[in-house]
Image: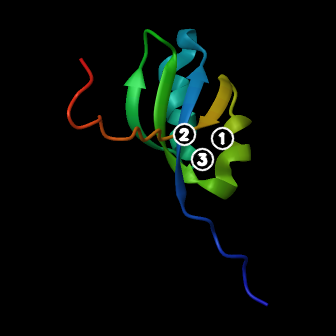
Amino acid sequence: MGQAARSGPVGVILSVDPDRFAQVVEAARRVGLTVTGEQQILGSLSGTIAEDRIPVLAAVDGVESVDREQIVRLPPPPDPPIR
């Protein structure tokens, strides 16, 4: 058998140590995170990473939590609108 198939990318949101924000972002990139958003003041960033790399990302020094991005779809409003 060959190498196990790598899983596709998933969206994640990270809480990181705001005092070491730049260093944590760089370390997260090194383990495979593609950064899509940075909120330094809030100490969070978002991005995509292969699902099988999430445990490695969570172990990066300065990463406080890793949550999968969740998409919520709301139904369309009623027609005619409720008044």
Please, is residue 66 above or below residue 1 in the view?
above
Please, is residue 56 above or below residue 60 in the view?
below
**Which secondary structure lies at badge 3?**
loop
* Quadrant containing the C terminus in the rendered view: top left
* Labels 1 and 2: the sequence-earlier one: 2
- Three-letter code for the amino acid on which mark 1 is drawn: Leu
Q: CA distance from mark 1 to mark 2?
A: 10 Å
**Which secondary structure lies at badge 2?**
strand
**Which secondary structure lies at badge 1?**
helix
Question: Who's the residue at 72% across and 80% down the image?
Answer: 3
Question: Who's the residue at 38% across and 31% down the image?
Answer: 37
Residue ID for mark 3: 31
- Three-letter code for the amino acid on which mark 3 is drawn: Val
Residue ID for mark 1: 57
Residue 29 at x, y percent in the picture: 51, 42
* Labels 1 and 3: the sequence-earlier one: 3
For the residue carrying disc 3, how many other residues have a C-alpha within 10 Å: few (<14), some (14-19), or many (20+)?
some
Please, is residue 62 above or below residue 9 in the view?
above
Q: Are marks 1 and 2 in contact (CB under 8 Å)?
A: yes
Query: Which dot, 2 or 3, sits closer to the camera?
Result: 2
Query: Which dot, 1 or 3, sits closer to the camera?
Result: 1
Q: Are marks 1 and 3 in contact (CB under 8 Å)?
A: yes
Q: CA distance from mark 1 to mark 3?
A: 6 Å
Residue 31 at x, y percent in the picture: 60, 47
The disc placed on residue 36 is none
